[in-house]
Image (cartoon, helix red, strand yellow):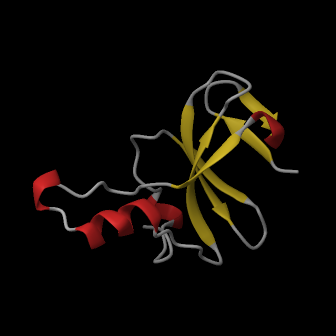
Amino acid sequence: MLRLSCPFCGPRDEREFHCGGQSHIQRPGPAEAVSDASWGSYLFDRINPRGHHAERWHHSFGCGRWFNVLRDTTTHHILAVYAMTEPVPDMVQSDSVA
């Protein structure tokens, strides 16, 4: 089981959280200029890298807040926890992180 450190509540077991999938996805726009293919890609296409991956996590059985986690998908090692408004940390940013 993962042990995540909520930036607001501190370390907690994974069962208190829900993963919201890939982080840092940009919504295409303006809406009237977006093709069906671009919109479909935005809704359904996600990366599934081996290695560093930025994910959104929700502390659903705690404070109820969202935050980002940079996790190594091969080892499940948590590399960084950071706010939703912050970019992927430079020290661990790689090509597999969008």
Nearest the viewer among 84 and 90 is 84
- Find the residue positioned furthest to the front: 36
Nearest the viewer among 63 and 82 is 63
Q: Position of residue 15 (x, y in %)?
A: 82, 39
Query: In the figure, 56 relative to 36: above or below?
Result: above
Q: Is residue 48 visible?
A: yes
Q: Is residue 46 left or right of residue 26?
A: right
Query: In the figure, 82 relative to 78: above or below?
Result: above
Q: Position of residue 56 (x, y in %)?
A: 56, 48
Q: Is residue 30 visible?
A: no
- Find the residue positioned furthest to the top: 63
Residue at x 48% of width, y 67% of height: 93
Nearest the viewer among 63 and 3 is 63
Query: For residue 43, which quarter of the picture?
Result: bottom left
Nearest the viewer among 56 and 46 is 46
Residue at x 65% of width, y 21% of height: 63
Q: Is residue 57 left or right of residue 86?
A: right
Residue at x 11% of width, y 61% of height: 33
Q: Position of residue 4 (x, y in %)?
A: 74, 42
Q: Is residue 15 left or right of residue 51?
A: right
Quadrant that contains the C terminus = bottom left
Residue at x 76% of width, y 62% of height: 76
Q: Is residue 47 left or right of residue 18?
A: left
- Find the residue positioned furthest to the right: 1
Q: Position of residue 34 (x, y in %)?
A: 18, 62
